[in-house]
Image: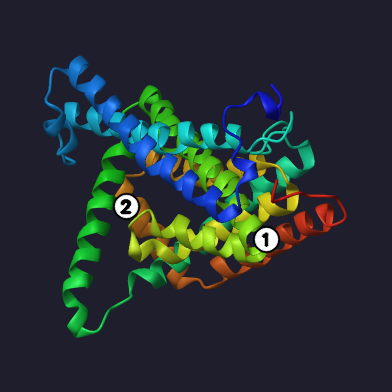
Amino acid sequence: MNDRSRLFDLNVYPPVIQLFISASIVIIGGTLLFYLFVFAGSLVLGKDMSEILSIQPGANSDEGFILKYLQVSQQVALFIIPAIVIAMLLRQGNKSFLKTDRFPGSIPLFMVIMLAILILPVTIYTGMLNSRMTLPGWLSGVENWMRTKENTASDLTGLLIKSRGIGDLMINISILAVIPSVAEELIFRGILQQILCRIFKSGHIAICITAIFFSAVHLQFYGFLPRLILGLSFGYLFFWSGNLWIAVVAHFINNAIPVMMSHFIKWNDLSDKASDMVEKKVLIPLVPALLSIGILYYFWSEYRNKLVESAG
């Protein structure tokens, strides 16, 4: 299908309009799709939609299944499907707007896997520092709200990540690593970052804004800094390589390692042990940080002389 055969070509509009229409597709279309998934789930489970949407983390196995269903529904409805639709509207000729038409070679793939592993101690350490953040007394209400959101997210993660066997582990890797890495990279790096590149004519500004939004949208303010670091890393990997799969693989490894570790160690114990380790031994995050910078430099030097049309 060529550009002329499309009913609507988003490329003919200014980048700001592209951003507005894309945001509308995500917010309006994604929300409608999500409620459609919830409605379908209510028919299968024999529960009211309000009951499904109001469910909270608990010990009940049915609650765990519903929460996992909602997690997948959100990723697919709000990220994956809107990103594909937007990419089709922004495609020029037969070229993939999302830059997913080729898989990375063995050396870049190895380097990005190493980066994702090495950056974990860095994000754990910065997360520990971030968790000590306090607000002025007059913002105590905001701080209490932030703490509540953080605790709720932690409880949800603890429930979703729980596994009693290899089958549960595989399901958890799919729900917490495979689907989120694809979904979030499609919408944040694949769509948002590239449109922002067109608006600001600067990859660096686009990467920074996307990373800030990527971290903020999780509504876990005491984990804002480590997610910001991840967002910047994923953004530059995509910007330099011109291949979204590079960022997807890095995101997947970063998510999959805690899921696999928690299979052998309880989630709370895993978080506490990791924080204690990096706090007592500063070199644990420092050395991986330097090595991570070295790997990012490799990607910059490897692709700097290649034409990377990051703005599409």
Query: Which amino acid, mark 2?
Result: Asp
Q: Secondary structure at mark 2?
A: helix
Q: Residue at x 39, y 33 (%)?
A: 77
On the image, the x and y values in percent for residue 236 come to 66, 57
Q: Nearer the viewer, mark 1 or mark 2?
A: 1
Image quarter of residue 78: top left
**Residue 56 pos. (x, y %):** 16, 41
Residue 118 seen: no
**Please, which residue is most extreme toward the right here?**
305
- Residue 235 against residue 172 in the figure, above or below: below
Spot occupied by residue 179 in the image (x, y as percentages of width and height): 46, 33
Tell me the colour scheme of the image: rainbow
Mark 1 lies on a secondary structure that is: helix
Q: Earlier in the sequence, mark 1 or mark 2?
A: 1
> For mark 1, does the 10 Å Cα neighbourhood hold few (<14), some (14 to 19), or many (20 or more) residues?
many
Residue at 66%, 43% (x, y): give it.
246
Q: Nearer the viewer, residue 205 or 129?
A: 205
| Residue 181 appears left or right of 109 | left
Mark 2 crowdedness (10 Å alpha carbons): few <14, some 14-19, many ≥20: few
Position of the N terminus by quadrant: top right
